[in-house]
Amino acid sequence: MGHYAPRGAVGSSTSKIDEVRERFARSGFHTWIGMRLERVEPGEVDVALDVEPHHLNLVGLLHGGLIATLADTATGLAYRTVLEPGTRHVTTHLSVTFLSPGRADTVTARGKVVKSGGRFGYAEADVVGPEGELLARATATFAVSPERAGQ
Amino acid sequence: MGHYAPRGAVGSSTSKIDEVRERFARSGFHTWIGMRLERVEPGEVDVALDVEPHHLNLVGLLHGGLIATLADTATGLAYRTVLEPGTRHVTTHLSVTFLSPGRADTVTARGKVVKSGGRFGYAEADVVGPEGELLARATATFAVSPERAGQ
Amino acid sequence: MGHYAPRGAVGSSTSKIDEVRERFARSGFHTWIGMRLERVEPGEVDVALDVEPHHLNLVGLLHGGLIATLADTATGLAYRTVLEPGTRHVTTHLSVTFLSPGRADTVTARGKVVKSGGRFGYAEADVVGPEGELLARATATFAVSPERAGQ
Amino acid sequence: MGHYAPRGAVGSSTSKIDEVRERFARSGFHTWIGMRLERVEPGEVDVALDVEPHHLNLVGLLHGGLIATLADTATGLAYRTVLEPGTRHVTTHLSVTFLSPGRADTVTARGKVVKSGGRFGYAEADVVGPEGELLARATATFAVSPERAGQ
């Protein structure tokens, strides 16, 4: 599948990337979960989680809800880097296929934008362990709309 | 859509329900997230979350990852109540459609089994606010297999 | 889950229903597949297929692609009945879970709108056999936009 | 995402590929739809459709149900090439995201296995136009079980 080719100028990409970093840093949710922002490029964002005991289910595997949370975050932030000025996005559909038991100490979701548009967008994520082993694959669709004041 | 009609005897349903309650109570993950087990019936489980500031995203709405986590938990536990003896299940696919902004103080995921079988199962969840307003709809598929020793 | 409550006046609902019937009648695709329009109500459309040998896969079951086609058609037409004047919709995501082998002589997809809006909509479908037995469950999301001249 | 690495011997891959070709050739469904089998490799199958007027919806685009049918066929056949001897598979979930209007004269679905196993499998498909432009992305999950006599 083709890599996302950003249409914006370098300057606007840079400011979008800075904005993603700044928003991540002040998110109480991300801090509480324990996520780290690993990489931000135009159309691509990686977020990682160092797995701790409270992240596990009763059979000792990373809870599927956290795999979904990582995928949701990585795809949503990846899409934020490609938003046209004056627009905003909300995730409308998230789909996660669980492929291998979540046994890794560190888990990374690699979000990548596949399609952006004025009304609709689409991104995907690989959720992988430390050696790149595939734990889950996810897809996300977005509704894009004009930004309203105050948001 | 038809309601799930459990095939097992009353006795086994009761023990399955007790098992779900017992497992939920000793789950460090559920405690950490802040989920409550609201209702357990054969084929149906409701879990609720009292929304706190660290559950919110930067625009003040319940994070989509938590909506997915609630749906994953409600469907997975609902399926556990209908497992045939000697079998276990893992979620293979979770799909969530976000329908309304998560503005509620308390959010409940109502999981319900639609189809159970020896190899494959399927459940759905409504994620609703305090007045029953629909925030999200979710589907989950399960792979069912013989229980192995030690699990 | 709540039933869709149409907001439009009776008059506009009637004309939308007539429009769905008229469009279905002149669709060469629907004729070629062999679909019948069974029922049109505000927010709900049923389409049926009398299964013929060329609809079957090599093990004698209704091909999954046709189950997806029925679900896509029923949800898309159901959404058409609730479109606000001056808007149009396209399906952005279709998800089908296959629950039972497609052994029925006649298969019906019952589409129902769950959520409509100015930019985003959501519908579901049951795909059932003659006795109402559930063969598949489907979900569809829509992007809604202003109607352009000529469409 | 990693390419599927088949575990079987060359001999068994060859016979699986021949089996896919042979089954496709005698499928009345595929002939009726108008699909061509373009490519069969271990873990990968491409199917193509030359678009004709009866394949179009009322606005002149390839019907979404046919895009789903192509994706269902390409992923299902791709998985067939990697089945362990003595097992069979059924598609349990098909998910299609529609990314661009289906305006192409010829449309190809490129199915690829991502994960195979004794009970569960997963494949994806790109649906593309003649220049490789992406029209849709699809995912499919499979339940795998022992082959029964006569199937």
Image (cartoon, coloured by chain):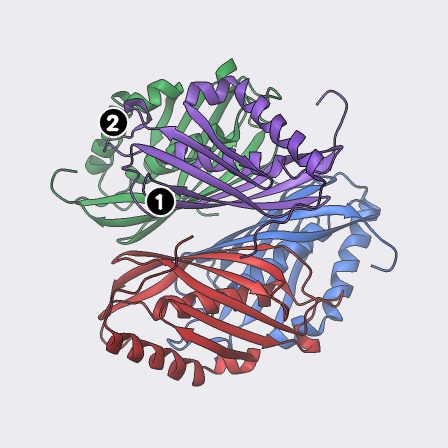
Chain colours: A purple, B green, C blue, D red
Residue drawn at the location 63% of the way across and 55% of the way down? D99
Count neighbours of disc 1 (C-alpha within 10 A) and say few if under 14, some if 14 to 19, many if 20 or more. few
Q: Quadrant of residue D82?
A: bottom left
The residue under label 1 is A132
The residue under label 2 is B23
Residue drawn at the location 34% of the way across and 23% of the way down? B30
Q: Label 2: chain?
A: B
Looking at the picture, how far across and down is residue B141, in whole percent? 38, 47
The amino acid type, in three-letter code, at marker 1 is Gly
Looking at the picture, how far across and down is residue D96, in whole percent? 54, 56
The amino acid type, in three-letter code, at marker 2 is Arg
Q: Does residue C103 sit above or below C121 in this rendering?
A: below
Looking at the picture, how far across and down is residue D51, in whole percent? 65, 76
Quick one: B98 or C10, which is closer to the camera? B98
Looking at the picture, how far across and down is residue B113, in whole percent? 38, 42
Q: Does residue A121 sit above or below D57 in this rendering?
A: above
Residue C4 in view (yes/no): no
Residue drawn at the location 57% of the way across and 80% of the way down? D34
Helix or strand or loop: what does disc 2 sit on?
helix
Q: Quadrant of the C terminus of chain B?
A: top left
Q: Quadrant of residue C117?
A: top right
* Identity of the residue furthest to the front in this view: A10
